[in-house]
Image: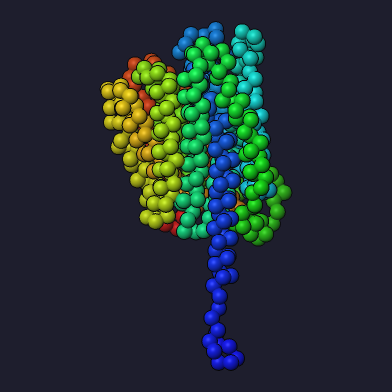
Amino acid sequence: MTHPTGVEEIQSPAPALHAQRRAHYAGARAILAASIGNALEWYDFSVYALFAIYIAKNVFVGSDGVAALISAFLIFGVGFIARPVGAVVLGAYADRAGRRAALTLSLVIMAGGTLCIAVAPPYAALGVGAPLLVLCGRLLQGLSAGGEIGGAVSFLVEHAPAERRGRYAAWLQASMAVSNILGALVAATLATLLSPAQLTAWGWRIPFILGLAIAPVGLWLRASLEETPAFEAARARAPERRHLLGPVRDILVEEPRALGIALGVSIVWVIAVYTLIIYMPTYMQRSLGFPPSEVFTASVVGNIAMACGCIAAGRIADRFGRVRTVRLGALLLLLSTFPLLAWIAAARTVTALFVGQTLFCLIVSVFAGSAPAVLASLFPTRLRSTGVSLSYNFAATLFGGFAPAVLTFLTESTHTPMAPAFYVVAAAAVSLVALAQIRRSDTE
């Protein structure tokens, strides 16, 4: 631009730089707030599996050891029955009222479920009322978890620049890994400080009490979130829906193909996480004979690797293609799960435990770190939370939630330690077929 005096005027880059910094700050704040809240919520949900052995001894005292553990895992799985309900109700609520409102509500519901489990008395004190109270808690937790993932994925993707959606969305699974780290750290600490008798009597309640204590932090963080610009723009363009379940009806009518593909992609995601991450601590103790302190410590190390791997996978996905990265993760799960588990089972050393669990977590992270951005890209903004919630949670209910109970039964009845590997390999094959159906236009 030329000044009237004839001297060329140099425009200051300060406004553009300031806007860029503001956008970067807003994105970092969105990632931090969503991830911390997500980690706290999933800690409450997943810590049940780490202490299932001790819950079983309290709540199902009248049963033998194997039957009690299977019963505890069945209650863990029953919580997943509520997840489709949460996906429908809270997913639709997020597409109507906004991502922030839905994320805050889901955390409140999760805290209520955790409270039920934390205060559940032993079977000897309340009889059948004890498992019923735990069941109530798991149903509330399932309802919350069902709506959490769709709202969280939508929130992260819609705050991200187009070229960084992979790395933003990767924080979803990374924060879940952080929740596993918190749970495993608590478990390892308690296993070290308390005797088995103390853990069985009262120590297993401590993780749930800690979850309740930190819930207000998550609520404060989510109350401070700003709604996503994409959602605000979509709400301004579209007429207001009168029916709560309007987004569910719309997605079934308008996006059945995307819903089917997302369900297929989600199958190996949930099965790999719940088999190789959530179920492994129990499997390593009961089937391979590792002591609790070693198992929980290996889980901490593995989940640290998983959190880092998810962030790396998100960056790789943005650079080399999100569908391509997810496909690589599914292929790794297909080819490596069986030989890796066979090696751990044959060696049964501390080295094999730590190396094997870390490799499992890294392999899962390749898929789980890049999958959220792929699922989000399959659906339009106005239906995104509902679409992601429905596809992921139906997969979780049908194939992931009952995985610990099914695998415990298969391992005990067939006397083979390879049942978890067969389950993951079959799921990876299904998801590779689903990924092959994605066209370039589906994710643009």
Q: Residue at x 42, y 43 (%)?
A: 308
Residue 114 in percent (x, y) is at 62, 27
The single residue placed furthest to the right in the displayed view is: 242
Residue 259 in percent (x, y) is at 51, 45
Q: Relative to 443, does residue 100 appear above or below in the rendering?
A: above
Q: Residue at x 64, y 49 (%)?
A: 225
Q: Relative to 396, does residue 414 appear above or below in the rendering?
A: above
Q: Residue at x 55, y 54 (%)?
A: 27
Is the N terminus in the top left, top right, bottom left or bottom right quadrant? bottom right
Q: Relative to 441, does residue 173 appear above or below in the rendering?
A: above
Splitting the image into 4 quarters, where does residue 369 fall? Answer: top left
- As rendered, which of 239 and 194 lies closer to the eye? 194
Q: Residue 407, can we see it?
A: no
Q: Residue 24, can we see it?
A: yes
Residue 290 in percent (x, y) is at 37, 19
- As rendered, which of 323 and 361 lies closer to the eye? 361
Count of numbered marks: 0
The single residue placed furthest to the bottom in the displayed view is: 5
Q: Residue at x 37, y 34 (%)?
A: 358
Splitting the image into 4 quarters, where does residue 412 fall? Answer: top left
Left or right of 95? Residue 303 is: left
